[in-house]
Amino acid sequence: MVPMDSGSQADKSADLQGQQNKRQRLANATATRLAAVATERAEARDSSLIEATGHVRIGDLLMFSGLVSSEFIQTALRNFEEKGLPLGKVLTLSGYITEAQLRCALDVQALVNERQLPLDVGVKVLTLAYKESVPLSDAFERSGVVQPEDHLSNKLGQLVLDAQVVDHSILENALEVNHRTGLPLGHILCYRSIISQQLLETALLGQQLIRRGSITREQCVKAISQAHLREKKLGQLPENIGFKKSMLRHSPRVGELLFEAELIADGQLLESLQTSLSMARPSGLCMKEVCGMDSIYITATVELQEMIDNGMLTTPLAVDTFVRMKEFSHSFLRALAEASVSRILLNPGKKLIELLNETGSYSIDIGSLPAEIRERLDVNYNQSIEVCRALVEAKIVDQHGVYSALRLIYLLEEGLLTDEQALLALDMACTTPLAVDEAIFRLGWKKRTRLRED
């Protein structure tokens, strides 16, 4: 045998020591970050009521009734966005309307939204109350309209109260804020972390189905109660530590994502949701029974929704993820990673190799790679998906590592993580092994917005 050159042996020993030192530094950095996250979460407090959006109907009702001009509404909306106050509050503070006029408008709005009063009739009554400065009850009488009874049984507040989700004191306080500010009751309950966005959606869906006659009120209350109890149970699981009830804006619902990806038809979706409410069972389980939905899609939906909630994925890319899972039988991680980088124009291939090397789990010499991979790395258009495929096929990098890195390339390109954060997340994902987005959560750069199943 030819004796090993002492210099070469020394170089290899130095490389090995360097890799070990790198691994130790990463381990120390990760441990430090995890400790900091634990402290941050332990000290976190419930958020207070924050900016309201989306409830523009009160403005329309005020304009239709002649209480406020369109110019005043536009000015109020600008102040609404700048000051973070509900529109109704901005209008009263600015002197456009009085508190009494706002309360009348909110009462009419509630009757219209509850479908107890046609919009044109509501506008007529509110206009009369404003012009003649009379209470709403007198305006109903003078306009020859019978004032609808206040059917509390089908109102959101009464439904969640009867389902034992809230108590009387909490509901009364939330209703007081609702009347004072014009902020929808559901938003108030979510903003105050009293109920989750998912539970609110369940209650609102149930409310709609009661109005259509599709389910009974008793079925709706039972469904809300069971969903609430299920949330409490899931909240105790280790993987759901850090979950916080909050208002989630612009996030698609489970059925919407699955429908957009053509994994479920609209009729099947409606049947699944109706079955879920009438039988007080999880919607995902009902989708499996109604249309044979594979559970991997239900699980993936929860993950994708949370990424969208945190701004770490767009809805079109989430839909693309489902399409890749369905059409190419890709794993969730691979489909997500490929969908994430599919719209990047320039080639991030070398950045991908650099990121993998920096973890210390891999040692990839670009000069020693197969010619096909080197060629793909050198072009100036995106070849990262093909590079990942070739690395896996050549058994240079395992699928978990390469597609975790590919997912991080998207987050880096979008400026959602720093290089250091991406490195820590990839190292944690490769050594645990965790899904890379779960590693991001545990390191404190993503919120837990969706409950995981046991």
Image: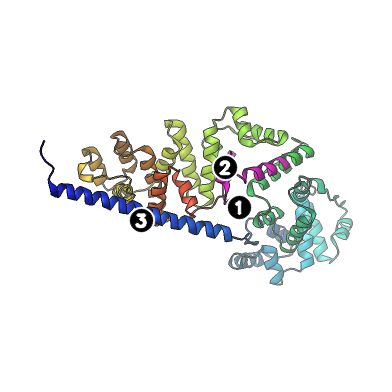
Which residue is pictured at 37% across the width and 54% down the height?
A: 26
The image quadrant where one finds the N terminus is top left
Residue 83 lies in the magenta stretch: no
Label placed on residue 353: none
Dot 1: element: loop
Q: Amino acid at mark 2?
A: Arg
Q: Which residues are magenta?
A: 225-254
Q: Nearer the viewer, residue 27 or 414?
A: 27
Cα distance, mark 2 to mark 3?
Answer: 32 Å
Residue under pointer 2? 452
Residue 117 in percent (x, y) is at: 79, 49
Residue under pointer 1? 244
Q: Nearer the viewer, residue 208 or 73?
A: 208
The residue sitting at the left extreme is: 2
Residue 63 in percent (x, y) is at: 70, 61
Q: Amino acid at mark 3?
A: Arg
Residue 248 lies in the magenta stretch: yes
Which tag, 2 or 1, sits closer to the chain's start?
1
